[in-house]
Image: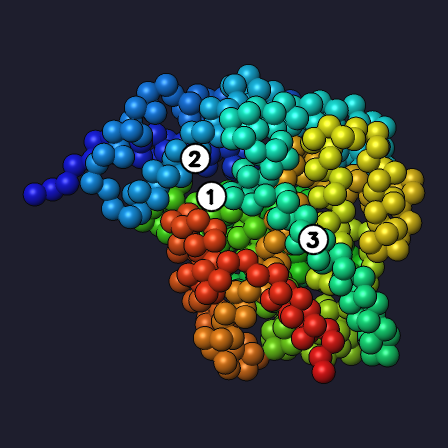
Amino acid sequence: MSVTTPAYDRLAAVNRRLHHLGHLGSIAGWDQAAHMPPKGNEARTAALAELAGLMHGLRTDAGLPDEMVRAEQEPLDEVQRANLREIRRNWELANALPSALVQRRTLAARRCEHAWRTQRPANDWKGFLGNFREVLAVAREEAALLSARSGLPRYDALMDRFEPGMRSDTVSHVFGEVRQWLPDLIERVQARQASEPVIQPVGPFPIPAQRVLCERVMRLLGFDFEAGRLDVSTHPFCGGVPEDVRITTRFREDEFLSSLMGTIHETGHARYEQGLPRGWLGQPVAEARSMALHESQSLSFEMQLASHPGFVALLSPLVRETFGDQPAFEPANLHRLVTRVQRGLIRVDADEVTYPAHVILRFEIERPLIEGEIEPEDIPALWDAKMQELLGLDTRGNYRDGPLQDVHWPEALFGYFPCYSLGAMYAAQWFAAMRSAMPDLDARIGAGELGCVFDWLQTNIWSQGSRHTTDELAIRASGEPLNPAHFRAHLQARYLPA
């Protein structure tokens, strides 16, 4: 006798439709960032706002609550119940916000991001503020509505959209501990590296050759080019859908490592998307569990794997074949280059030791910004003070390499930044679990046997989608919920070995 689940099936059909519409929106957004001519922005922004309104209407359909109640009484299996949990969560989030606000957010963010592309190189903070005030006003309105519905503080209500279950008090505690040991670690690592000679590569490095190298490394990392592609944008990102993953990077002729490592980072995101459970696609349970878990995949690829001496030895011949032989490309020197710790202004170019300082800085500004404790005009002074405190760098008057450097605030992605460092902590935890299960992991990486890494991630992270809560997934994968001690231990072992 077959089991019937009519209410659940109707909910699943709505979510398949949302998945298809989201597919179109993702590709349109990718095109807007990577290929669209500038004069197309207003029309594209209006179209995406219309699409956002349509999807919001589907998510907030008045009949869905009754369907969810009926579905609860149906004979669902474990995956279906997990999917129903995610459907209910998405419904709660959507119903906290009126459709007009969702469309206004899309319009404000798209306009601000489009203007930011020219305002950043022009160091035009004053011009940026004109659009940004509207973006912030919408974000604060969203935060207030989400907070009223969930009972969470306003910043937490925004962060919960990216990292379900995470709270800012927890982030503050974790980041507070990092603040205690990070400055000393940076000092000690830089002092140690000062005595280690490093040869700088000699350019120029033609952009077509860089692209070929990036694509070769993507193939080495298992990226499926039948289900995705590489392009160029102002700010590197991974978008699209599991069936069609779009990643972007950016190139400079005077150096090649930032584009290469950035591409590896985005390939980690892409492999997660390509590895999500295909049998559940179109449903919330088939989506990535959280953005910290997503960042744990990009950082597993970029920091844990690509900065591993064994992997760098695999990169070395590819780099020499691409740009010609020179001493800088020898494996030992190349490894020193990719693990060089330097205080810098740009987050996306930061090494893994100084990177947490950049994230802490942004968290400590955007939390009070959303809570209304500070205003946009206060950001530069706070940025300058925290950059000096955390990294000892002077950013006064340099908005381009200061608060204008990231796309997140123009796009109203408040609450996302903590996910980067939480992701680095999860990545260290995943590799600690791999080494426990495979004591010869480092030797296998050096031998080019990367499949063991991908298989572990596929089994424990990618294939699980949103089947479990974040803590449950972490416990199943590694035996414990998030434990930041693994991140500190990783940095100590890599940069200050006994």
Q: Residue 241 has which mark?
A: 1
**Position of the N terminus by quadrant:** top left
Find residue 116 and report its image quarter: top right
Secondary structure at badge 3 equals helix
Q: Nearer the viewer, residue 180 or 141?
A: 180
Seen as rendered, the residue at the extreme top is 100
Q: Residue 89 has which mark?
A: 2
- Mark 3 and mark 1: Cα distance apart in space: 32 Å
Look at the numbered discs 2 and 3 and tell me whether their residues touch, using CB distance below 8 Å.
Answer: no
Q: Where does the image place residue 487, in percent across and percent down from the top left?
A: 63, 64
Q: Nearer the viewer, residue 179 or 365?
A: 179
Secondary structure at badge 2 equals helix
Q: Residue 175 has which mark?
A: 3
Q: How many marks?
A: 3
Identified at 64% across, 45% down, the residue is: 169
Identified at 29% across, 29% down, the residue is: 69
In the image: residue 152, left or right of residue 179:
left
Q: Where does the image place residue 403, in percent across and percent down from the top left?
A: 79, 40
Q: Where does the image place residue 291, in percent across and percent down from the top left?
A: 55, 47
| Chain-order first, disc 2 or disc 3 | 2
In the image: residue 485, left or right of residue 204:
left
| Residue type at the position of mark 3 | Phe
- Mark 2 and mark 3: Cα distance apart in space: 28 Å
Can residue 237 be seen here? The reply is: yes
Find residue 383 and report its image quarter: top right
| Residue type at the position of mark 2 | Arg
